[in-house]
Image (cartoon, rainbow, N blue to C red):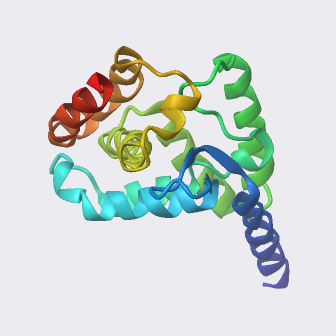
Amino acid sequence: MSDRLDRQIAFLSEADKLKSILRASRLHDASRFENSAEHSWHVMLYAYVLADQADTNVQIDRVIKMLLLHDLVEIDAGDNPIHGDVDAAAMAAKEAAAADRIFGLLPEDQALSFRALWDEFEAAETPDAIFAKSIDRVQTPIGNLSNGGGSWTDYNVSFDQLETRVGTPVKRGAPGLWEWLLPKLRLFFKS
């Protein structure tokens, strides 16, 4: 039992590093950049509150677990801004290596379970993962609408880019949420 607890505590101590990873997005009040741990907490809350936007076959408890784990790889790989100029294949390899290392800190049963959830989220093929991806993508645009553009301004984002990179996954997993957000985005990008 001691070895199991040692490994679990080592993982939890490593996860604390997520608090130090700054994202490209700002808080709603624009006072500072958000860290990845805050983002993970906030998207879990989004999923819980907006669960009625998911298909009826989506299991919100699994979605929340995916969102809890999805960005732990940023401890090694760093933040990958959706509108940044990043080599997607290189970043995917870096994130997979990070997942191996970070989840590998856990006892084997948990390592396999957590890694499977992370892989499922990344693949975005199951109803749970599709909804989780949509919630992950929608949080920052809602924040950017509150803070005057935030990362859209920093990355010179166009409405077309936003519709492709955010709209496509959100429509896929939470079409009603996208219908609600779309007129607000159009209005922002006209101004």
**97 above or below 17?**
above
**Quarter of image, res 138:** top left
> Could you tell me which residue is drawn at 64 percent across and 63 percent down?
110
x then y, percent, for residue 29: 47, 58
Dividing the image into 4 quarters, which one contains the C terminus? Answer: top left
> Could you tell me which residue is drawn at 16 percent across and 41 percent down?
180
Q: Is residue 73 left or right of residue 164?
A: right
x then y, percent, for residue 27: 51, 56
x then y, percent, for residue 161: 41, 17
> Could you tell me which residue is drawn at 76 percent across and 50 percent down?
75
**Is residue 73 in view?**
no
For the image, the number of numbered tags is: 0
**Is residue 119 in view?**
yes
Dividing the image into 4 quarters, which one contains the N terminus? Answer: bottom right
Q: Is residue 101 left or right of residue 19?
A: right
> Could you tell me which residue is drawn at 32 percent across and 43 percent down?
131
Residue sitting farthest toward the front = 191
